[in-house]
Amino acid sequence: MLRIALKTLFGFHGKVIGMVVGLAVASLMMTQQPATMLSILTRTYSFVEDVSQPDIWVMDPMVQFVDDAKPLADSKLGLVRSVTGVAWAVPIFKTVTSARLPDGNTASGQLVGVDDASLIGAPAQMVSGRTADLHMTDAIFVNDEGAKLRFAQKQPNGTLRPLQVGDVLELNEHRAEVVGIAKTGPTFSSQPVIYTTYTRAKSYAPPQRKTMSFVLAKTRPGLDVAKLARQITRETGLAAYTADEFKDLSLWYFIKNTGILINFGMITLVGFIVGAVVSGIMFFNFTQDNLRHFAVLKAIGASARQLLGMVLLQATIVGVIGYGIGIGLASIMAMSSSTFQVKFTTGLLAFSAGGVLLICVLAAGFSVVKVLRLEPAVVFKA
Amino acid sequence: MLTVECKQLTKVYGTGETAVQALRGVDLAVAPGELLLLVGPSGCGKTTLISVIASVLNGTSGECRVLERDVLTMPNRDKPGFRLKHIGFVFQAFNLNPTLTAAENVAVPLLIAGWKYGKALARAKELLAQVGMPEKADVLPDQLSGGQQQRVAIARAFAQEPDLIVCDEPTSALDSKTGERVMHLIRDMTHRTHRSVIVVTHDARIFKFADRIVTMEDGRIVDTAAPSPSAAH
C-alpha cells in the first residue's frame, strides 16, 4: 500500500514539484533568516565570549550592553578586589579609535586594553603570534576578521593583502606594531578589534579622566558566581553580572531596542505562510484529484488506517524532500558568504523542521478528512 | 446457500420533503455461479441496489443478506474487510490508477489484504494472463485501449477470488465488439470459478450473456426472466 502511495505521489510530477518547491522555500526562509538573526545577535556579546577567564563582569549600573561601556574611575578596581570571595580582579578598557594603515588609509576599530601584568582579557586563541608578545614595545594584536577585511591593504595590482604580523599602524599618532593576529568572534559592528595593554591603550585613546570600562573578576573556587555578583553589587554600588547574565543583558537590549526580531520574525513567518499556503493547497488539490482513486481503494476494502497511512506517507515524503532542499540551499547561501558567518544550530534546524512538519500535518490533516469522509459509493458515479 | 438474498429492501435518500425513495421493497436472490443482469431506465434504482448489496451504501430498511451476512446491520467497521474478502468491483469508467502499471492495478486488492509486493505482482500477472493480457503487465493504463483497461479491471475484481462481483455498466464505454469480448470474459471467469456476478446495464447487446435478467422500475423489480431465445448464446 505504501508503494502505491509513493507511485501515485510521484506519478503527478507537476504537483510534487510545486509542493516540494513551496516547502523548500518555507524551509529555506525558516532556517536562513533565524540563523542570520541569531548570528547577528550572537555578535552583540562576542566580546564577552572572547574573554574567557573572568566569570564576573563589573560595570557602571547604567550599562545596557557590551558596547555601552561607561568609564569608571580606577579606584573602583580596589573596591571590587576588596569584596570577600573575589579571587582576583583586573581592569579592561574598551573604546573606539581610528587607525592609520600602512598604505596611508584610515579605518576605525575597537581598542581593547587588557591588564598589563596578567594580560587577562586578551583573546584566548591566536592565529599567529603569542599572547605574551603583547608585552613587547608598541605591541598590538588585531583580530583576524579585521585583519582580512577592514584593515586589509590595497596592493598595486588591485588585490587586498590582509594585515600581517610586522605591519605597523598609527593610533592617535602613536606607533603600534602588529605582533599577533587573534581569533575572536565577529563583532556586531564588524569593526576590527585591536588588543593591547591597558596602559598602552590609554595612551592610544584620547585623554579622559576615567578610563576603565569594566572590571573583570574571578570567583574563589567553591563559591557561587551569581551570589558573589550580587554581593559585589551590594558592596560597591556597581552592576555585577556573571558572564552569561551580561550576554543576556546585551542580547535583550538589542531584541527590545531594535527591529531585528520583528524584521527577521516577519520574514520567517512569511516563509512559513507561503510554504503552508502553496504546499498546503497543492497537497490538498493533489488529494482532491485522487479522491476517486481513494474511493476505489475504499470500495475494494482499504481500511481508514491504510488510507491515513498513505496520505501521511505522501505528506512526509514531500516534507522531507522540501526540507532537505531548503536546508541545502540555506547551507549553500551561508557558505557562499565570506564576510558573514552564519551558524546553523541543532535547535534552529529542529525549529525549521518543526515548521515544515506543521505545514505537512496541516496539509495532510485537511486532505485526510476528505478521504476518510468519502462515501465509497461514489465509485459507481460515472 | 444463496450469494445474495434481499427481502423488502428499501433505500431512502434525504429526509422530509426532499426525501427520495430509491428502492421500494426489493426482493432479489442471486445463486452461486449465476450471472444476473440488472436492467431498467435511468434512475430506477439499479446502481443503488448494487451499492447496498456491495455494502458501499447503507440501506434504509428490509434485509439484504450477502453470503448469509445482513449488510444492513453489519457494523461499518466490518464492511471494508467484508468487501475485500467477498466482493469484487468492475466499474463503467474502469477506475484504474493512472500512475500504476496494469499489474500493479490488478495487485491493489492483494496489497490491501497485506500481500507482499512481489507475491502480489506475480499473482496479478497470472490474472492478466487469464484475461489475455500477459504482455501488458508493465504498461500504464493510458497506453491501453478501453477494452484492455476493462480487462485489467476485471482481473482486479477477480484478484481476491471474491464470491460476488458487481459490475456497473461494464460495456457502456466500449464499442460493441469490445463489449462482447469483455462480457465473454466475465461470463467465462464467472462460470469457471463458480462465482456470482451482478451486472447493471442499459446495453441490450449483452443481454444474451445473462443467466437471468431482472428489470427494475421506480425502485422495484418489475420482471425477472431468462434471456430471450433470440438473444441466447
Image (spheres, coloured by chain):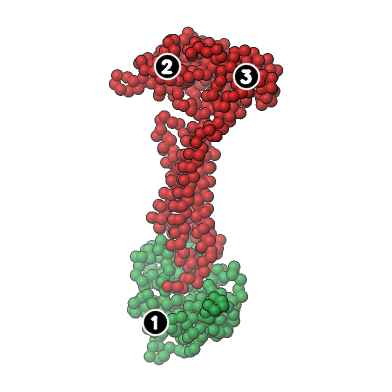
Chain colours: A red, B green
Could you give the CA–CA distance between mark 3 and mark 2, rounded to whole angstroms? 30 Å
The residue where tag 3 is placed is A217
Subunit of label 3: A
Which mark is in front, 1 or 2?
2
Name the amino acid, label 3: Ala
Question: Do tag 1 and tag 3 residues touch (Cβ < 8 Å)?
Answer: no
Of the pair B40 and A38, the residue shown nearer to us: A38
Q: Nearer the viewer, residue A122 or A43?
A: A43
Q: Which residue is mark 1?
A: B203
Determine the residue positioned at 53% across, 81% down.
B21
- Single out the residue that lies furthest toward the top: A137
Q: Secondary structure at mark 2?
A: strand
Report the amino acid beneath label 2: Ala
Q: In the figure, A37 relative to A299: above or below?
A: above
Quick one: label 3, few (<14), some, or many (20+) residues within 10 Å? Answer: many
Pair 1/3: label in front: 3
Drawn side of residue A64 relative to residue B45, left or right: right
Residue located beneath label 2 in the image: A99
> What distance separates the C-alpha of mark 1 from that of mark 3?
98 Å
Are the two marked residues, 1 and 2, in contact with CB atoms closer than 8 angstroms?
no
Residue A169, percent from left and from top: 41, 14
Q: Where residue A214 sits: x, y (%)?
A: 58, 19
Q: Residue B183 lies in what quarter of the image?
A: bottom left
Task: Say if labels 3 and 2 share a chain.
Answer: yes
Residue at disc 1, secondary structure: loop
Spatial CA span between label 1 and label 2: 97 Å
